Amino acid sequence: MARHRWLILGTAAVGVVMVFAAAVLVTARPDLFSGPGGASQCRAATAIQKATAPLAEGPMAAFQTTTPVSLVDLPYGDGRTLSDFAGRTILLNLWATWCAPCRAEMADLAQLQQRLGSDAFEVVAVSIDSNDANRPEDFLAETNAEALAYHREPTLALFNSLRTAGLALGMPTTLLVGSDGCVAGTLAGAAPWGGPQAERLVRAALAADTGSGQ
């Protein structure tokens, strides 16, 4: 009987923990993504979401559109925020030198930047390495990705904020962000960003962003 009571109590405790964890996830999102440029002002991202949803197929099947939410206030190392990229569509990629799938896609990301990079679009590949500051930059050269600008966020604040909101699960994580600073879609894991399907998806995003009047 005592053992049975402990089982009931243990099950109840697990239930409480799960409810608490769910509450944390639900309440964390508004706190992280509030302020100017919030979800009600994500016109560009909403347009991108609609334009890219049909293109999540074949090699890009892992791309998932998401409810647009502002990222402009998220920390981005050295006191900066993602508002630094406001006014252009960006493909925000989080990577690390210890991440094998990251290594596999770096050259593809660089190819995409070489083909489509402009004042209206940039591949923003951000290293989350927290140790040797020079290692990530060397990594770009090793992976034929020198076309990418060097961005580093060693505090993990950006990744942890995105993870809390359910927008990042691991490395690499890629987010398609509109010129309004709102996320329109995500992709977990490596992808053939240098291929024609990825270029088609990004071109559709750019056209939708431009047409949104943001």
Image (spheres, rainbow, N blue to C red):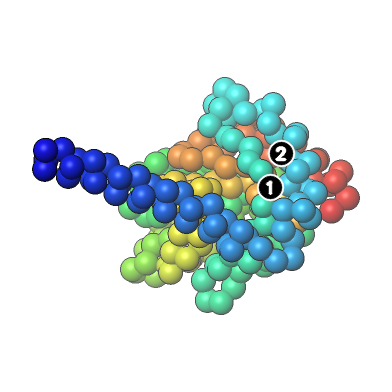
* Image coords of residue 148 (percent x, y): 56, 55
Residue that carries the numbered disc 2 in the rendered image: 49
Type of the residue with mark 1: Pro
Pointer 1 with pointer 2, Cβ within 8 A: yes
Front disc: 1 or 2: 1
Outermost residue toward the bottom?
Answer: 79
Q: Residue at x 72, y 53 (%)?
A: 39
Q: Quadrant of residue 201?
A: top right
The answer to whether residue 181 is left or right of residue 97 is right
Type of the residue with mark 2: Gln
The answer to whether residue 76 is left or right of residue 211 is left
Residue 189 can be seen, yes or no? yes
**Residue neighbourhood size for the residue with mark 1, other residues' Cα within 10 Å, grouped as few (<14), some (14–19), many (≥20):** many
Q: Tag 1, which secondary structure?
A: strand
Gap in angstroms between the C-alphas marked 1 and 2: 8 Å
Q: Residue at x 48, y 40 (%)?
A: 188
* Image coords of residue 3 (percent x, y): 11, 40
Q: Residue at x 39, y 41 (%)?
A: 101
Residue that carries the numbered disc 1 in the rendered image: 68
Outermost residue toward the left?
Answer: 2
* Image coords of residue 7 (percent x, y): 19, 40
Residue 144 can be seen, yes or no? no
Q: Nearer the viewer, residue 1 or 180?
A: 1
